[in-house]
Image (cartoon, grey):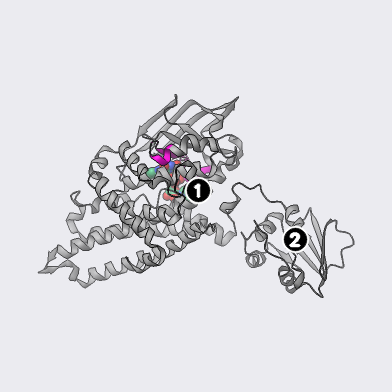
Amino acid sequence: MNSLEQYYFTEEHQMFRKTLRDFLQKEVLPNVDQWEEDGQLPKDIFLKVGEMGFFGMTHEEKYGGSNLDFWYDVIYIEEIGRCESGGFGASISAHPYLSMSHLKYEGSDFIKQKYLTKAIKGEWRGALAISEPHAGSDVAGIKTTAVKQNDHYIINGSKCFITNGVTADYMVVACKTKPDAGASGISMIVVDADAPGIMKTNLKKLGWKASDTAEIAFDNVKVPSENLLGDENKGFYYIMQRFELERLTLALGALSASEYALEYTLQYMNERKAFGRTINKFQVLRHRIAQLYAEVTSVKTYTYHICRMYNDKHYCVKEASMSKLLATELSDKVMTECLQMFGGYGYMEEYKMARMFRDSRLGPIGGGSSEIMREIISKIVIDDVSYSPRSTVDRPQLNIEELFSSLPSRFKKEKSAGIQMKILFDFGNKKYLIKIENENITTEKTVDSGLSSVDLTIETDEQTYINVETEKLNPQEAFLNGKIKVSDLGKMMQFGTLFEKFNN
Ligand SMILES: Cc1cc2nc3c(=O)[nH]c(=O)nc-3n(C[C@H](O)[C@H](O)[C@H](O)COP(=O)(O)OP(=O)(O)OC[C@H]3O[C@@H](n4cnc5c(N)ncnc54)[C@H](O)[C@@H]3O)c2cc1C
């Protein structure tokens, strides 16, 4: 066990890793070449993984899960990444981390009883169907529609590149329920994969061969309305929320495959001779391997930190996007350089390096491409765009009235002795006057007139203020970018010290 693992994993985690590794050695590695040939995984392996409880580790016990911490999932993804088949990893991970996570977070009790319990047991395989032939990165641009008719929806449209799409028993499908509303018109619906009107075609692809990847057509597919996940038209929001986990799993998978490729390559370098010595003695090659180890370990250390944030329920979409970007691109580099160490044998199917090289290529494309990751990161760091935390999923959108009515209960009386201040919050069409006199505070909605005597004026828009109060936006950044204008910075800072954080 290396020091990073010692630091993050308990003895129980390590025991679990051993159990899982033994299981994969016995049940997966001897079969993986055949599954690559078949282009899909057999039902049997889902049942075995389900029976071991690996699909339900972080799920509630009442649906058959074990309610464990996220580090068990981290180990699962890492060990799956060492199975010499990106396709096996894709299929056996898309089920729990793409399809099941929507059931877990947005599913009603009915959905969980009907689908999640079977998914946890591995009896039913799931797929997540968002991408379409003309809309991959542009999720809001999907065209598949779900029209409500009495107690059911009628779905029409098509999906593309769907992992497990051919073999799935159910699919979580993104549909437009308000076609003209862009991102605000998408809903997520669970669809039985054998429903009349569904046609699936397996696509031939460069790598990930052991997983089936489908193009799916929906022709007047009738689905009961109770199969809606969460609320109608909130699908885009749910998709963005779940991307946090998806990106983290893709980063972990890429790093684990990279480590495995490095180990595999070192073994080969130990044996292969050129010019009278094993090639692991050539300094130029040694340095290349050392460099790759340093880079993989650095990104892995960063990614573990994000896993800890995720486990502690800190919202980390920015960090997970960065991790996915760095880890998947690094994996491509590792595979290219490792293959080079094999010389001509790296190009031959006889060695697993060729497959690892092919499989890695999907990392910077799927689950949000590298370009989209950079786009998200630049929106966050350059344009101050904030993405809502996980905890807000089931909470109605906060409004400004709620925030102002919470001020008296958050007021720190012990800090306000001797302070007399009148503060005007100016949101354009709405204005609030706050009066602080020693230990008393009053807030009132007001109009412009008669306010020349205020000590501090804060001009901003409602969303910026909500974002600052709910810690989605750093107030200094907002101030520097001109999103908040204040008449007296010193007084603004003093005002900020008088309140407890808004408890969301
Ligand atoms: C093997 C495989 C499995 C998959 N599994 C699933 C699955 O299970 N479920 C699912 O829903 N989808 C799945 N996908 C789809 C995958 O998520 C998309 O392929 C991916 O999001 C990219 O979309 P696209 O292929 O339509 O490319 P496009 O969106 O057409 O992009 C083409 C190129 O343009 C770039 N680009 C696009 N927009 C921008 C922009 N704004 N700025 C800069 N560059 C941009 C992209 O980065 C890319 O390089 C899978 C794909 C593959 C190949």
Name the front one of labels 1 and 2. Answer: 2
- Image quadrant holding the N terminus, namely bottom left
Q: Earlier in the sequence, mark 1 or mark 2?
A: 1
Whether residue 120 is in magenta: the answer is yes
- Image quadrant holding the C terminus, namely bottom right
Name the residue carrying label 2: 409
Q: Viewed as shown, does residue 150 lie left or right of 400?
A: left
Can residue 239 be seen by looking at this rendering?
Answer: yes
- State the image coordinates of residue 36 (x, y, percent, origin top left): 26, 42
Q: Is 203 drawn above or below residue 442 in the view shown?
A: above
Question: Which stretch did the figure color magenta?
Answer: 118-139
- State the image coordinates of residue 258 (x, y, percent, origin top left): 32, 58
- Disc 2 on helix, strand or loop? helix
Q: Nearer the viewer, residue 491 or 393?
A: 393
Whether residue 373 is in magenta: the answer is no
Name of the residue lying farthest toward the left: 276
- State the image coordinates of residue 425 (x, y, percent, origin top left): 77, 61
Q: Tag 1: residue type?
A: Arg
Residue at the image point whose x is 87% and y is 66% from the top = 452
Q: Tag 2: residue type?
A: Ser
Q: Viewed as shown, does residue 119 lie left or right of 352?
A: right
Q: Nearer the viewer, residue 100 or 398?
A: 100
Q: CA distance from mark 1 to mark 2?
A: 34 Å
- Disc 1 on helix, strand or loop? helix
Residue at the image point whose x is 42% and y is 39% from the top = 119
Q: Is 70 drawn above or below residue 62 in the view shown?
A: below
Name the residue carrying label 1: 242
Residue at the image point whose x is 32% and y is 52% from the top = 20
